[in-house]
């Protein structure tokens, strides 16, 4: 374990917990002279205290720690996320050009589809249902689906009872 210097003792508890394991994992860190070690610690301290986007880095690290990491190497996650943010900060994403193929759908078609869904969700009166039940009793699922398609309702259901219910509501 590395002995803490006076400057490192000034670090807050959270920063020193993250900083100490990182210093011991660097290649040939133990072979450096004591002056170089102090410079590295000071530079690391200044970067930690005055870097821009610390909150974002913390949020990303927290999300990565909870979702993707092994939860045993948090220091590695911090380094990986920090380096990636540095590399991607200069690159600006260009949005893809998207051409709407059916602009009329977004004006009128979407309202019609929502109205159809609303009609299908809420059942109609029992008198209307009794007449359409007689029609659908002798029909096959393929025939009911074709009738629904004529009415403008697309469904992937193959269950006969469910198709009969949808047809009864639609008629």
Image (cartoon, helix red, strand yellow):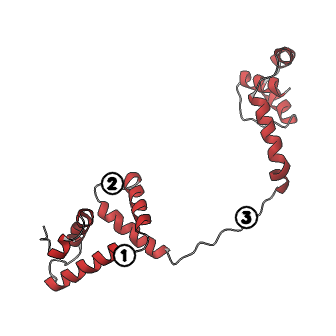
- Left or right: residue 35 compared with residue 116: left
Separation (CA) of disc 1 from disc 3: 40 Å
Between circles 1 and 3, the one closer to the viewer is 1
Residue at image point 81% right, 16% down: 137
**81, above or below 164, in the image:** below
Local packing at callout 2 (Cα closer than 10 Å; few below 14, some 14-19, many 20+) is few
**113, above or below 29, in the image:** above
Local packing at callout 1 (Cα closer than 10 Å; few below 14, some 14-19, many 20+) is few
- The quarter of the picture where residue 37 lies is bottom left
- Pointer 1 residue: 50
- In front: 144, or 51? 51
Residue at image point 77% right, 33% down: 118
Separation (CA) of disc 1 from disc 2: 29 Å
- Pointer 2 residue: 70
Tell which circle, 2 or 3, labels the residue nearer the N-terminal end: 2
Q: Secondary structure at mark 2?
A: loop
Local packing at callout 3 (Cα closer than 10 Å; few below 14, some 14-19, many 20+) is few
Instruction: Tell me the tag on residue 98.
Output: 3
Tell which circle, 1 or 3, labels the residue nearer the N-terminal end: 1
Position of residue 153 measured from the top left corner of the image (x, y, whole percent) = 81, 36
- Quarter placement of the N terminus: bottom left
Position of residue 25 measured from the top left corner of the image (x, y, whole percent) = 22, 70
**124, above or below 83, in the image:** above
Residue at image point 87% right, 34% down: 151
Residue at image point 82% right, 51% down: 105
């Amino acid at each position: 374990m590395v002995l803490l210097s006076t400057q490192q003792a000034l670090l807050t508890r959270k920063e020193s917990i993250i900083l100490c394991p990182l210093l011991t994992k660097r290649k040939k860190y133990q072979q450096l002279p004591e002056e170089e070690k102090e410079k590295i610690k000071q530079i690391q301290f200044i970067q930690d205290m005055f870097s821009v986007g610390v909150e974002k880095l913390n949020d990303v690290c927290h999300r990565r720690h909870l979702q993707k990491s092994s939860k045993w190497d948090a220091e590695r996650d911090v380094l990986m996320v920090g380096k990636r943010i540095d590399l991607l900060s200069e690159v600006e994403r260009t949005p893809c050009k998207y051409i709407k193929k059916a602009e009329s759908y977004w004006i009128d078609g979407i309202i019609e589809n929502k109205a159809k869904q609303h009609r299908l969700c809420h059942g109609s009166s029992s008198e209307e249902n009794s007449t359409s039940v007689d029609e659908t009793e002798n029909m096959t699922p393929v025939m009911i689906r074709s009738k629904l398609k004529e009415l403008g309702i697309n469904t992937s259901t193959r269950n006969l009872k469910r198709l009969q219910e949808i047809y009864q509501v639609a008629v």
